Image (tube, grey):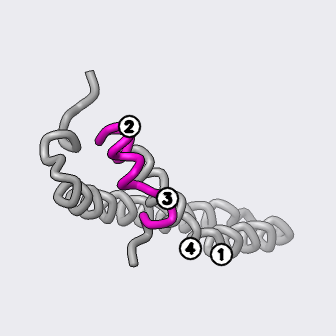
Amino acid sequence: YSKYEILPSNEIMEYFGEEIGFYFAFLSHYCYSLLPMVPIAIGFQCWQIAELTKKDNTVLFSSAWAALVFTIAYSLILNKWSMDQSALAHRWHAYDSHGKLPP
């Protein structure tokens, strides 16, 4: 089972080409990768609201932790995408298209 099976990524690639196929595969990967972060974001938001009710200035502490956690998560998401992109390039025989920079 692949997470790209929800979108017909093979049909998209065959009809529109490899660049559009990679684009929709990235959107699918990005959306599914952000879903597990929703409860974490809600937890950080509740932590910030709880800190706002206090009278000391520790609101920046929870914001700093949230920024650190989400920066690490985004870097992991993009590293995972590079592995998935290579797998898709191998499956689609599109070895030259995913490494090019846009003009």
Q: Residue 39, image x and y in percent? A: 65, 75
Q: Residue 36, image x and y in percent? A: 56, 73
Asked if residue 13 lies in the magenta stretch, the reply is yes
| Residues at marks 1 and 4 touching, judged by CB atoms closer than 8 Å | yes
From the image, state whether disc 2 or disc 4 is nearer to you.
2
> What residue is pinned by disc 2?
16
Q: CA distance from mark 2 to mark 1?
A: 36 Å
Label 4 or label 3, whichever comes before in sequence order: 3
Location of the C terminus by quadrant is top left
Mark 2 surroundings within 10 Å by alpha-carbon count, few (fewer than 14), some (14 through 19), many (20 or more): few
Label 2 or label 4, whichever comes before in sequence order: 2
Label 2 or label 3, whichever comes before in sequence order: 3
SS category of the residue bearing label 3: loop
SS category of the residue bearing label 4: loop
Q: CA distance from mark 1 to mark 4?
A: 7 Å
Magenta-highlighted residues: 4-22
> What residue is pinned by disc 1?
39
Q: Is residue 78 left or right of residue 85?
A: right
> What residue is pinned by disc 3?
7
From the image, state whether disc 4 or disc 3 is nearer to you.
3
